[in-house]
Amino acid sequence: MITFLRRLFIKDYQNVNDENVRRAHGVFGAIFGIVTNILIAGLKVGAAIFLASKASWVFPVALIADAVNNISDIASSIVTLIGFKLADKPADKEHPFGHQRIEYIAGLFVAILILVAGYELLKESIESVIAFHSSGTHSSYDLLACIILGVSILLKFFQSMVNRGLGKAINSPTLLAVSLDSLMDCLTTSSVLLSAILMLTLGWNFMDGYIGILVSFLLIISGIKAVKETASPLIGEGVNKELEETIRGEVLAHKEIHGVHDFICHYYGVDKKFITLHAEIDQNTTLIEAHRIVDEIEDQLKAEYKADVTIHIDPTAIGDHEVARMELLVLHEVTMIDPRAKIHDFQMDKENKRIDFDVLAPFDSKLTEEVLKKRLLENIAAFEFSFHIDHPMGD
């Protein structure tokens, strides 16, 4: 069904790497959300007014709160629509990396709206519980309300599946956040429907406020999760290890490259990224030849991953057994402090008795420059050492 909708409303829908096709997915998802949420909210508000007119104008708080939640979903869809439109703006002087991170901001705003809706619902539900226990004031439901709630659940579930399908197709955190919100709405409306059924069948008129409290907590939990998921790329996530290993393998496939390290990937949007890495090349290779090699690799990666790629050349002594033996000795001293640590950029100046290298150690490592320098001077005293301790960019 979702593929059918994509084919029907999105031109060239399978070409998701194209910016126009990607934007079309987001716009369709937002418009679909606006239309369906208007329909759902209208049904619930109409049912609430009808029920209140038969119960001395005491409104069913859970139903009203659920309708207000759907109205906030309309706002979320509008934010999503605006987010995709603004994210598509080309780079300019003030934002040379483009505007694609606006999509993350839109997703974060949607998450905040979920939290606000949860808070307002919690407040109204607590007031409803207090009113029932103090004065016996309660709302009522009928069969028509139950039917409307059931239809709303089906529409919300379909809405969630559509947004999930669109979000997965273009890897959109905003659409996936909207999909999660819609799925949580299914649960909240199901709780309201359960309350209505218990009132009709068992006369449990006190259930309305308590169901509202349950619904509010579900919304708040959903909102917190969505905030974490959409804020993470804005704060700065670690390197995607799968992407790193794939690119590392492609670079090492070139026989002139003997090692890859310091891989960094900056995301400025879902499909806008900058990749940098260090490649080890035989120190006897001429600068012109080394430059040609990395240029070819950069062009290959740029075409394949649609990313800006920069490769730093690290000269390394290939076939020098004395350097290789010393590198193993230094690595031994490093791993005696932390077995997880690695070394790279190893350079040995035999004439001046100097060794330079970098250490890659986990963030929680007890390996410090002071501890390592002391150990090196005690066990490999003939050399002067210069090194830096780095931490991995990935998870």
Image (cartoon, grey):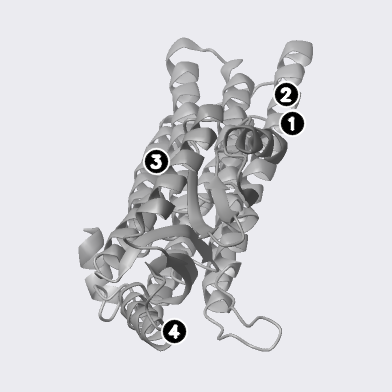
The residue that label 2 is drawn on is 126
Marks 2 and 3, how far apart at CA: 24 Å
- Determine which residue is flagged by label 4: 287
Q: Position of residue 197 (x, y in %)?
A: 43, 22
Tell me residue 100's x, y (percent).
Answer: 55, 72
Q: Residue at x 52, y 53 (%)?
A: 42
Q: Is residue 272 above or below residue 228?
A: below
Mark with earlier residue (2, 3):
2
Mark 4 Cα shell of 10 Å, populated few (<14), some (14-19), many (≥20): few
> What is the three-letter code of the residue carrying label 2?
Ile
Residue 395, visible in the rendered structure: no
Quarter holding the N terminus?
bottom left
Q: Nearer the viewer, mark 4 or mark 3?
A: 4
Residue 68, image x and y in percent? 62, 46
The tag on residue 153 is 3
Alpha carbon separation for disc pair 1 and 4: 69 Å
**Hey, what amino acid is under mark 1?**
Lys
Q: CA distance from mark 4 to mark 3?
A: 66 Å
User: CB of mark 2 within 8 Å of CB of mark 1?
Assistant: yes
Tell me the kind of residue under disc 4: Leu
Report crowding for label 2: few under 14, some 14 to 19, many 20 or more residues within 10 A (C-alpha).
Answer: some
Question: Could you tell me if the residues under marks 1 and 3 are in contact, i.e. CB atoms within 8 Å?
Answer: no
Disc 3 secondary structure class: helix
When the figure is inspected, residue 269 is found, relative to residue 49, above or below; the finding is below
N-term-proximal mark, 2 vs 4: 2
Q: Earlier in the sequence, mark 1 or mark 3?
A: 1
Disc number lying in front (1 or 4) = 4
Q: CA distance from mark 2 to mark 1?
A: 5 Å
At x 57% / y 23%, what residue is drawn?
211
Which secondary structure lies at badge 4?
helix
